[in-house]
Amino acid sequence: MRYRVPKLPASIWHMADIDVEKSQFITWICCAPDIGAFSALLNAAKTAHPNASHHCTAYIAGPPDEQNFIGFSDDGEPGGTAGRPMYQVLQGSQLGHIGCVVIRYFGGTKLGTGGLARAYAQAVSHALETLPTCEVIERDIYTLRLSFAHEAIARAWCEERDVPIEQADYDGNGVRLAVGWPRDCPLDFSPLENRLKSTIEFHTAPP
């Protein structure tokens, strides 16, 4: 599976803001490969804006179709007017590993439930417009058993196909290369065997 995620280092947030009927909505977004990364974002937002009216949240701590490590919160806004609209925008973006907090400073004008839902959704959509992203490729690790003479050829073949070498281990019989094969591509080492003019011993690496 391939999908895009926020291109943000740990503890670095992407920020944007909008004004709706004198209320300010400030969006913070992080890369959230796990719930801990999202929690760090929320804590930082609360520390930076302790006097805000609300800190509403949504996150997908996994691939875009994640069903378990997801969540959203209205943080005191009327039920269903903040967290869920925010989450729906994240879900529609097809991004994974993403968490966001929308910080609201109430401006004195009530927006109503429909107006609130639109404002929170708009705040997230506006921030996503300028969010830097990068592609994640889910991979399975396979270990190739090779002779010393074949190592350089195998490394070059992997580089040509954008198959990363995750680890190399050596012993008296040769080398074991742990390679990351794209999960959405059929496994096929026969082109490498043809180049080496030799069969390859390989197996799935332990998790």
Image: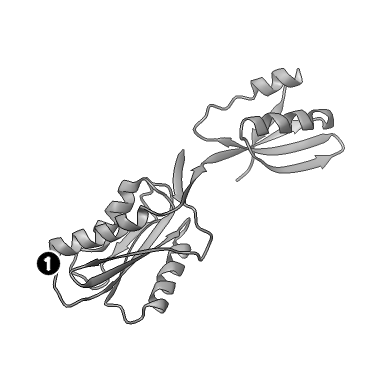
**Residue under numbered circle 1:** 112
Q: Is residue 133 above or below residue 119?
A: above
Residue 156 seen from this side: yes
Q: How many marks?
A: 1
Find residue 48 and report its horizontal and vertical position in percent.
41, 77
- Residue 69 lies in what quarter of the image? bottom left
Foreground residue, 177 or 42? 42
Is 121 left, or right, of 60 in this rendering?
left
Q: Is residue 159 above or below residue 129?
A: above
Q: Residue at x 55, y 35 (%)?
A: 182
Which SS class for mark 1? helix
Mark 1 Cα-neighbour bin, 10 Å: few <14, some 14–19, many ≥20: few
Find residue 181 and report its horizontal and vertical position in percent.
59, 35
Foreground residue, 195 or 140? 195
Query: How are the residues colored?
Result: one colour
- Residue 172 lies in what quarter of the image? top right
Foreground residue, 44 or 149? 44
Find residue 115 and report its horizontal and vertical position in percent.
15, 63
Is 80 left, or right, of 161 in this rendering?
left
Foreground residue, 87 or 168? 87
Q: Residue at x 79, y 28 (%)?
A: 150
**Which residue of the protein is positioned furthest toward the right in this rendering?**
172
Q: What type is the residue that disc 1 sits on?
A: Gly
Find residue 195 and report its horizontal and vertical position in percent.
72, 20
Residue 80 seen from this side: no
Is 176 left, or right, of 204 in this rendering?
right
